[in-house]
Image (cartoon, rainbow, N blue to C red):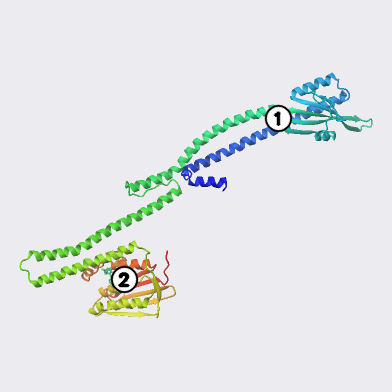
């Protein structure tokens, strides 16, 4: 594993790095520091190069003149010239360097350090110089420049022609300590500037990272306030588009939660009310029996029958409620099987027909297909269809009919439950799927309705990823159409 990836993993794990503030800080520091490092390095490097070039060109001009003097005073043949020796001393002092003069035979005839006189010197630079080339090499490790200058003799013939010959070579090394010193001073100044920039950067990065992250902290505290219940109003942090998006999403969630909370409260109060009604009736019935003396047995029996009816009703409400709550809790928890729908519907109708018969209501079954196979939860779908058919009977006139039709295409199967009963006025149609909603409370109560049947039906159908719609006309009849996919698509 490379150092990079180890560092990456460490950073990923560390809590600090996961902070946006820390990231902004680090980013600003990096962006701020990198240019100063490059500028420092670039300027110093450039200065050194330029300074060395200038020094070389200066010295070379000087040595060229000096080389002419050597020819003029015939120094290569005779090194006793006072003028030249004085000039040599002056030059070597001036450049804080060593001057070696080599003659045509590669013999060192003069060395200002006095170390190599009489020795022979053959090096590549010297050879190149004898061919008429100046050479200059900068040794930046040891801080000196080594240079060669040809000592050129120019003979002018009477006809004006010139002949040039290299009579010797000036081999010199000059110190660049002064350049190094300047670089050191510059570098120290650069360090001071860098430290100042670094400190300014730290301050700026801290301030900016705090400033940039502040709106997010405001989002957190606004949400916390809502959580602690200080306010139920919509919150707003419009500083950034991003915070606005978060807040919008949060407000939507808040709105949804409020609606849910309201509907939960309404549900609880509805449930309490619905459960209390049969109890209140029982209490009235029992009290009236208790208050009377010498109650005839028939009245007792009649009242006890009424009490039993109320108990049945209470029981039905609780059963329906449990069915509904269970369905809410186990959303998606369907027991899916491949079932034949015609058979399923026929079985439901068979069970219901005896009740319909009591009021001479005709329950008709029709199917356009011989076999409709679909993936459904048999128990839940049976409950849903039973509710629809029972409603068709309950909200019907005597001698009416309920017609159930099954149809299918390659994607969906459809169950239509049609009756010619009392119908549902248009303004109530959108509410009938709500829990405890009944168009005519007293009528529904009379016939044993809880107002939960259609809510259960709709839940079951939605769980099957299907949909249900109602068409109805008061006094004419009602049609419920249920459409469910043949294959169940789990989320
Ligand atoms: P309930 O237990 O009262 O029948 P439902 O949820 O099954 O409750 O139905 C809600 C209301 O919708 C009923 O009270 C009734 O007013 C109306 N309704 C449902 N089905 C029909 C229908 N086939 N014809 C007329 N009204 C209906």
Q: Nearer the viewer, residue 428 or 322?
A: 322
- Neighbour tally class for label 2: few under 14, some 14-19, many 20 plus, Cα within 10 Å: some
Query: For this view, does 144 lie left or right of residue 397?
Result: right
Residue 187 pos. (x, y %) = 62, 31
Q: Secondary structure at mark 1?
A: loop
Q: Which residue ends up furthest to the left in the rendered image?
A: 294
> Measured along the vertical axis of the image, is residue 134 above or below residue 224?
above
* Spatial CA span between label 1 and label 2: 100 Å
> Measured along the vertical axis of the image, is residue 367 above or below residue 255?
below
Residue 263 pos. (x, y %) = 30, 58
Q: Which mark is residue 344?
A: none
Q: Choose top left, top right, bottom left or bottom right for residue 264.
A: bottom left
Q: Choose top left, top right, bottom left or bottom right for residue 444.
A: bottom left
Query: For this view, does 51 lie left or right of residue 452?
Result: right
Q: Please report the residue visible at 37 percent of the width from the left and 46 percent of the height from the top.
A: 222
Q: Nearer the viewer, residue 120 or 54?
A: 120
Within the displayed image, which quadrant is ligand 1 positioned in? bottom left
Q: Nearer the viewer, residue 109 or 20?
A: 109
Evaluate whether residue 285 shows in this view: yes
Residue 228 pos. (x, y %) = 33, 47
Residue 48 pos. (x, y %) = 68, 32
Q: Which residue ends up furthest to the top in the rendered image?
A: 82
Query: For this view, does 304 lie left or right of residue 461?
Result: left
Q: Which residue is mark 2?
A: 383
Q: Which mark is residue 143?
A: 1
Query: For this view, does 8 lie left or right of residue 420?
Result: right
Evaluate whether residue 359 shows in this view: no
Disc number lying in front (1 or 2): 1
Q: Choose top left, top right, bottom left or bottom right for residue 118.
A: top right
Q: Quadrant of the C terminus?
A: bottom left
Number of residue marks: 2
Q: Please report the residue visible at 21 percent of the width from the left and 66 percent of the height from the top.
A: 314
């Amino acid at each position: 594993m490379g150092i990079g990836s180890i560092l990456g993993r460490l950073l990923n794990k560390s809590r600090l790095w996961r902070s946006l503030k820390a990231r902004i800080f680090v980013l600003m520091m990096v962006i701020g520091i990198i240019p100063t490092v490059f500028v420092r390095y670039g300027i110093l490097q450039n200065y050194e190069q330029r300074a060395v070039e200038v020094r070389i060109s200066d010295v070379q001009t000087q040595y060229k003149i000096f080389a002419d003097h050597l020819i003029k005073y015939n120094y290569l043949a005779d090194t006793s010239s006072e003028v030249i020796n004085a000039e040599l001393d002056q030059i070597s002092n001036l450049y804080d360097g060593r001057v070696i003069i080599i003659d045509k035979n590669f013999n060192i005839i003069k060395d200002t350090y006095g170390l190599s006189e009489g020795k022979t010197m053959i090096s590549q630079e010297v050879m190149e110089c004898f061919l008429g080339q100046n050479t200059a090499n900068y040794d930046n490790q040891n801080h000196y420049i080594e240079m060669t200058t040809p000592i050129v003799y120019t003979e002018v013939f009477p006809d004006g022609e010139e002949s040039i010959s290299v009579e010797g070579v000036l081999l010199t090394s000059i110190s660049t300590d002064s350049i190094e010193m300047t670089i050191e001073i510059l570098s120290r100044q650069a360090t001071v500037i860098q430290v100042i920039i670094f400190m300014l950067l730290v301050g700026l990065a801290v301030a900016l990272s705090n400033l940039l992250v502040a709106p997010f902290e405001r989002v957190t505290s606004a949400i916390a306030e809502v959580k602690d219940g200080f306010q139920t109003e919509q919150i707003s942090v419009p500083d950034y588009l991003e915070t606005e998006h978060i807040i919008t999403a949060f407000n939507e969630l808040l709105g949804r939660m409020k609606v849910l909370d309201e509907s939960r409260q309404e549900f609880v109060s509805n449930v309490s009310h619905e459960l209390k009604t049969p109890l209140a009736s029982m209490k009235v019935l029992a009290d009236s029996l208790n208050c009377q003396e010498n109650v005839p047995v028939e009245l007792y029996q009649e009242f006890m029958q009424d009490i039993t009816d109320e108990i049945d009703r209470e029981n039905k409400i609780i059963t329906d409620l449990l069915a509904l709550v269970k369905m809410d809790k186990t959303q998606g928890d369907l027991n899916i099987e491949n079932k034949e729908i015609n058979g399923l519907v026929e079985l439901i109708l068979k069970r219901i027909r005896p009740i319909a018969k009591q009021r001479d209501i005709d329950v008709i079954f029709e199917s356009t297909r011989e076999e409709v196979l679909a993936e459904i939860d048999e128990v839940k779908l049976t409950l849903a269809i039973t509710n629809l058919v029972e409603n068709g009977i309950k909200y019907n006139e005597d001698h009416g009919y309920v017609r159930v039709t099954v149809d299918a295409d390659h994607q969906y199967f459809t169950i239509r439950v049609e009756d010619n009963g009392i119908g549902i006025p248009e303004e109530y149609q959108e509410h009938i799927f709500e829990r405890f909603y009944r168009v005519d409370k007293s009528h529904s109560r009379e016939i044993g309705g809880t107002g939960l049947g259609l809510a259960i039906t709709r839940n079951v159908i939605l769980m099957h990823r299907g949909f249900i719609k109602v068409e109805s006309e008061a006094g004419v009849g009602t049609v419920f159409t249920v459409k469910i996919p043949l294959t169940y698509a789990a989320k």
